[in-house]
Image (spheres, rainbow, N blue to C red):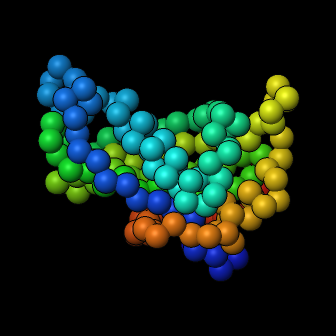
């Protein structure tokens, strides 16, 4: 957790592995993890009243480590938390839990862009405050074991 005393802003969603989520081997396709992380992000932003950010936050980095396979019909829990808020960027940490425990974990970095801007622009102060945990928190939080949070004021 950060030295600022704020809880990480987080969301948890539950999904089932659907047939189109699998590859020819019968387990989850690698791309479904990114979609689930983005679904958790959508739930988080909606819960914070920040749904208007959709379309203004392109992904600039995505990294995932796969730990175990998920199969058609498996129930998964996707946990996503704000790990760091920069001047115009934000990094999320996420985990996907399946029947055998952690199936995947990683991070995704997004950049805030303006409506009429071709590059990044600083987060609006109210948005930044909500993302840093000063705003309304979602009902479901992220279990923090194994995550390091550094919500700060890094100039990104």
Where in the figure is residue 83, as x and y percent of width and height? 59, 58
| Residue, far bottom | 5
Q: Nearer the viewer, residue 62 or 7?
A: 7
Q: Which residue is drawn at 82% across and 59% down?
A: 125
Q: In which quarter of the image is the N terminus?
A: bottom right
Q: Which of 99 and 74 is in front in this view?
A: 74
- Above-or-below relation of 86 to 5: above
- Above-or-below relation of 37 to 146: above
Q: Which residue is drawn at 70% across and 36% down?
A: 56
Report whether residue 49 is seen: yes
Where in the figure is residue 121, as x and y percent of width and height? 83, 40
Quarter of the view holding residue 79: bottom left
Q: How many marks?
A: 0
On screen, residue 65 versus residue 7, left or right, reads left
Q: Residue at x 17, y 19 (%)?
A: 24
Where in the figure is residue 12, as x and y percent of width and height? 41, 59
Quarter of the view holding residue 2: bottom right
Where in the figure is residue 74, as x and y percent of width and height? 17, 46
Quarter of the view holding residue 154: bottom right
- Above-or-below relation of 83 to 120: below
Q: Residue at x 52, y 47 (%)?
A: 42
On screen, residue 60 versus residue 72, left or right, reads right
Q: Nearer the viewer, residue 113 or 25?
A: 113
Report whether residue 84 is seen: no
- Above-or-below relation of 24 to 150: above
């Amino acid at each position: 957790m950060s030295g600022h005393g704020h809880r990480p802003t987080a969301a948890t969603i539950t999904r089932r592995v659907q047939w189109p989520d699998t590859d020819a081997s019968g387990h989850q396709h690698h791309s479904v993890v990114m979609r689930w992380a983005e679904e958790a992000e959508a739930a988080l932003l909606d819960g914070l009243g920040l749904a208007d950010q959709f379309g203004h936050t392109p992904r600039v980095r995505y990294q995932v480590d796969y730990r175990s396979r998920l199969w058609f019909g498996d129930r998964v829990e996707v946990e996503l938390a704000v790990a760091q808020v920069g001047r115009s960027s934000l990094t999320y940490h996420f985990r996907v839990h399946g029947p055998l425990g952690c199936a995947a974990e990683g991070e995704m970095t997004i950049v805030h862009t303006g409506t009429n801007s071709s590059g990044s622009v600083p987060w609006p102060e109210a948005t930044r405050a909500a993302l840093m945990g000063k705003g309304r928190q979602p009902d479901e939080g992220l279990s923090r074991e194994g995550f390091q949070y550094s919500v700060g004021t890094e100039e990104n």
